[in-house]
Amino acid sequence: SHQKTHENVELVRIGDNMDRFIIGRQFLVVLVIFLINACGSASPGADPFGLPKIWNDIFLENGIAMMMTTIVIGQLTSQVNAAVCMLDFINNYLMLFTTYLSLGVEYSGLLHSVYLVQIGFSKITGMTIESNEPPRNAFMQCFFWMQVMASTTLLGYCLAVTLQAL
């Protein structure tokens, strides 16, 4: 009765796709929140309701109003709906598209620096990283580490730009 739900679940059950989906989805969540904030932030000096300056400073200048809007409309509503109607929530083509997009973002290597952190934590704690896939061959291992290096370099560059902007 829930064919798209079945397709979604079967897709993320293959190998380590669940981990890949979560990494890609988290990037998409941050991207959407960033775009909502960029589109909805108040103009400097805005005074929409004629409230005292302290209220405008608290809610508009500091972004509290946009934060509340993003949380309530953008995240909380969908999380409550997904918790109550789990199968119905992912039984559509948009969720299937989102699943493929999340896997594509992870496959791009843009976020592979996450795996460097995962490997570091496993070494520190002495725990092994369990995988549902066979060990990588030499080519795939080389490709993986090239993605990790490129991702870490990009992350370092983004951190440098952010620190310079501050």
Image (cartoon, rainbow, N blue to C red):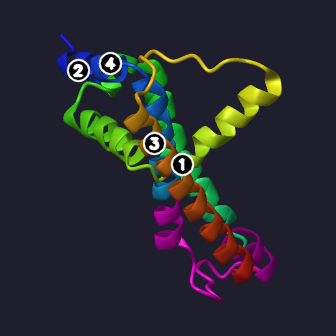
Residue closest to the eye, 75 or 48: 75
Q: CA distance from mark 1 to mark 2?
A: 30 Å
Residue at the spot 42% in from the left edge and 33% down from the top edge: 138
What's the residue type where badge 3 is placed? Cys
Q: Is residue 120 magenta?
A: no
Asked whether residue 41 is in view, the answer is yes
Answer whether labels 2 and 4 touch (C-beta < 8 Å). Answer: yes
Mark 1: give few (<14), some (14-19) or many (20+) Cα within 10 Å. Answer: many
Calculate the distance from the C-alpha at mark 3 to the C-alpha at mark 1. 10 Å
Image x and y of residue 4, in percent? 21, 23
Where is residue 29 shown, x and y percent of the image? 49, 48
- Of badges 3 and 4, nearer the viewer stands 3
Query: What kind of residue is marked 4?
Result: Val
Q: Nearer the viewer, mark 3 or mark 1?
A: 3
Q: Which mark is residue 148?
A: 1
Label 2, on which residue?
A: 7
* Residue holding disc 3: 142
Q: Which residues are magenta?
A: 33-61
